Image (tube, helix red, strand yellow):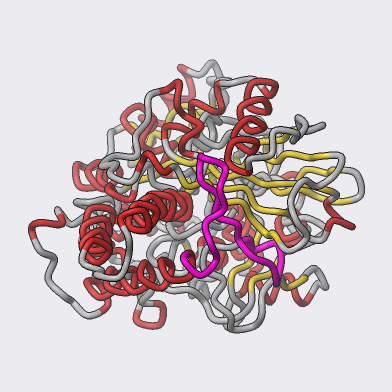
Amino acid sequence: MQSCEISSDSTDDPLSSALHRHRQPRIAVIGAGLAGLATTKTLLENGFTNVTVLEASDHIGGRVQSIQHGKTTLELGATWIHGANGNPIYHLAEDNGLLEHTTEEERSVGRISLYAKNGVAHYQTNNGKRIPKDLVEEFSDLYNEVYELTQEFFQNGKPVGAESQNSVGIFTRDVVRKKIMLDPYDSEGTKKLKLSMLQQYLKVESCESSSPSMDEVSLSEFGEWTEIPGAHHVIPAGFIKVVEILAQDIPSHVLHFSKPVRRIHWNCSSHDTEEIVDQADHNQDQRPSPSPVCVECEDGECLLADHVIITASLGVLKKAHETLFSPGLPLDKAQAIQKLGISTTDKIFLEFAEPFWSPECNSIQFVWEDEAQLESQAYPEELWYRKICSFDVLYPPERYGHMLSGWICGEEALCMEKCDDETVAEICTELLRQFTGNQNIPKPRRILRSSWGSNPYIRGSYSFTRVGSSGRDVEKLAEPLPYIKNTKAPNFQNTETAKKKPKHNRCFHNLYRYCLLGRPPIENTIPLPMVLCCQGRGRQTA
């Protein structure tokens, strides 16, 4: 964002002419997810009244999707608030009495269910055997030791060796395997089990990073992520309540639903906007005032604006940026979109009439013993189910009934999305029978699942720093357009760039950055003509 206090002789500022007309700048916000709503709320609170939100779907919330299930709510999207200290999403929910914590205040939950404070994760093999708890703990300690090594490259500036190819997956597999094979006390059978558990841990890690494989995640940037201290919380009434709180003070006339955008004509002259509006069959007698941006919707309607803020996901930008912007984006922005990564993490909810798991079990983790030496976790389409890493037990049963929540990510999640409910339910039931050794497990009486990858307005769950990309690509994507030589540096912080300021030099949880998006130092400022607010990176929010 840029200061309104611009001298009258400024010739390099695209805002000057609009400011001199003494009218409210016309601001378009594309997207009514948490980022778009937080931005809109802040603009309105700071006196910018001519704001229009264009949302492609028929509802607010973006990747927050709370589904009513009997007397409770299931979350197909965002579920937890991770950490409390300094987390504005936490304070928003706490102030409105929405929270329930699911972990102890400072306890690291690792790779167990976040639905329950207590309980034990059951690691089951595809031969129907449970791996002993002490062996699981021994391997977990080893894995976590190596995980800490992956953090040092970013946090301590440690150089990355060529053998790792700057990949978290390659580095982790190599180091863990060497440590396992060099252990003089383990039998060959124990070593094989540990190598198989390594593959399962990497699948969980991929779900948390929303990457197709940890091989694609940048080792040199991986340590950028830091968890906010404090307990993990759920919102029993549904995460959509946070969305509704953000939206409650936004006038209904500001929000426009079922308005997917076809093209954004930016850096336009007055003559350009006239031609665009005329071609869209609008009333040719209504000549627009000069506008640097014209937003053309799929239904043919054109919205003229002085500034536009885009909160579409990176997945949407990857799919459509070449046709979405006219003129096309500068090469550096297009390259940033191409280099950064985004993938799909989906949930599969299964409801049973009675639990087949023991009371202390909080999750069932799938360990394929025949994958001990696996080099790639990319599976043929017919084997998509092998990417399901686990099922969490939803707790408490008094709220959820007898419900499991499965996790799958990557291209295999997209394959799952193509299947019908009956097929997915049958495959999941067979997996549970195979891994628990209980052939009497009935089919679930209900299945509910997400489909973030095939949603044309989402195209992925959340983004990650892919090998070959860095925070510099995030910053480049966030810079407002058009680029201008101006001593008045832009002040606007968006979803991705907030963490790059000295006060926020770590990559926090996604929703935290969504809230930061809506809290720029906005006093006496208005946005530049076009800002790309690519929604956040980070670990599992859903």
Residue at 22% across, 80% down: 156
Quadrant location of residue 101? Answer: bottom right
Quadrant location of residue 411? Answer: top left
Residue at 69% across, 45% down: 65
Instruction: Inspect this view and state whether residue 259 appears.
Output: yes
**Residue 399's x, y, as percent?**
87, 56
Instruction: Tell whether position 129 is magenta.
Output: yes
* Secondary structure mostly taken by the magenta-highlighted segment of the chain: loop
Quadrant location of residue 541? Answer: bottom right
Q: Nearer the viewer, residue 83 or 374?
A: 374
| Mark count | 0
Instruction: Tell whether position 343 is magenta.
Output: no
Quadrant containing the N terminus is bottom left
Q: Nearer the viewer, residue 186 or 150?
A: 186
**Residue 289's x, y, as percent?**
48, 40
When the figure is inspected, residue 444 is found, relative to residue 313, above or below; the finding is above
Q: Nearer the viewer, residue 19 or 222?
A: 222
**Residue 64's x, y, as percent?**
65, 49
Instruction: Inspect this view and state whether residue 489 appears.
Output: no
Residue at 55% across, 49% down: 124
Q: Is residue 94 left or right of residue 51?
A: right
**Residue 292's x, y, as percent?**
39, 43
Report the span colored magenta. Answer: 113-135
Q: Is residue 57 left or right of residue 110?
A: right
Residue at 30% across, 60% down: 475
